[in-house]
Image (tube, grey):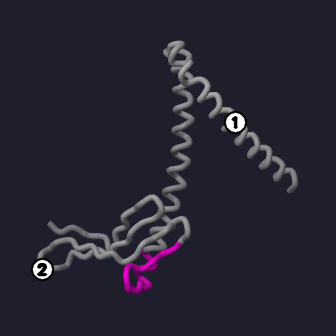
Amino acid sequence: MAVDLPEYFFRTRDSGATVFRVNGDNRQRRIEMEQIATINMRTGDVKPHGDRTLVAEDLQAIDTWIADRKETLEWRQIDDILRTVDQLNATAHWAQTKATDKQLETVTDSLLMAMHDLRTVLVRKKANALAKTEET
């Protein structure tokens, strides 16, 4: 059974990825992955592995991956925030319908401080955004 392999594989990590060139055309029909570079998403650095020189095709694949990865991470961040909104709604329902006094005592102060902090940040950001729109 023939499988179309990608030309590159990106092993993601917290701050970027390790880039491998994929080769399946060999006598043993094994997939070989040759490390060619590392990517640091925070700094934008792309470092060739060892004394390797990256060709234009490598750099194009890496640039495309970086752009796609940034988009994915931005989408995930928004999705996480929307999940937090759902969780806050579930927490409100729990507190109103199921929580015992002891359970509420355990979580109330932490929740109130976190919500106060979040509210303060959101109100400040909203006020700044409104001020900017009034200036224009």
Instruction: Tell me if 7 is positioned left or right of 125 in this view.
Output: left
- Magenta residues, as a range? 45-61
Image quadrant where residue 13 sits? bottom left
User: Which residue is outermost to the left?
Assistant: 28
Q: Relative to 64, is 79 above or below?
A: above
Q: Viewer-proximal residue, 40 or 64?
A: 40
Task: Give the numbered dot on residue 119.
Answer: 1
Taking the magenta stretch, the answer to whether it contains residue 112 is no
Task: Give the numbered dot on residue 33.
Answer: none
Q: Position of residue 72 (x, y in %)?
A: 49, 57
Q: Viewer-proximal residue, 118 or 84?
A: 118
Instruction: Tell me if 113 is positioned left or right of 65 in this view.
Output: right
Q: Position of residue 74 (x, y in %)?
A: 54, 55
What residue is rendered at 33% in x and 75% in y?
A: 35
Instruction: Tell me if 70 is positioned left or right of 6 in this view.
Output: right
Name which residue type carries label 2: Arg
Q: Viewer-proximal residue, 135 or 102?
A: 102
Which quadrant does the C terminus fall into? bottom right
Q: Secondary structure at mark 1?
A: helix
N-terminal label among 1 and 2: 2
Task: Give the numbered dot on residue 27.
Answer: 2
The 10 Å Cα crowd at callout 1, few under 14, some 14 to 19, many 20 or more, is few
What residue is rendered at 86% in x and 50% in y?
A: 134
What residue is rendered at 52% in x and 59% in y?
A: 71
Which quadrant does the N terminus fall into? bottom left
The 10 Å Cα crowd at callout 2, few under 14, some 14 to 19, many 20 or more, is few
Q: Position of residue 91 (x, y in %)?
A: 53, 26
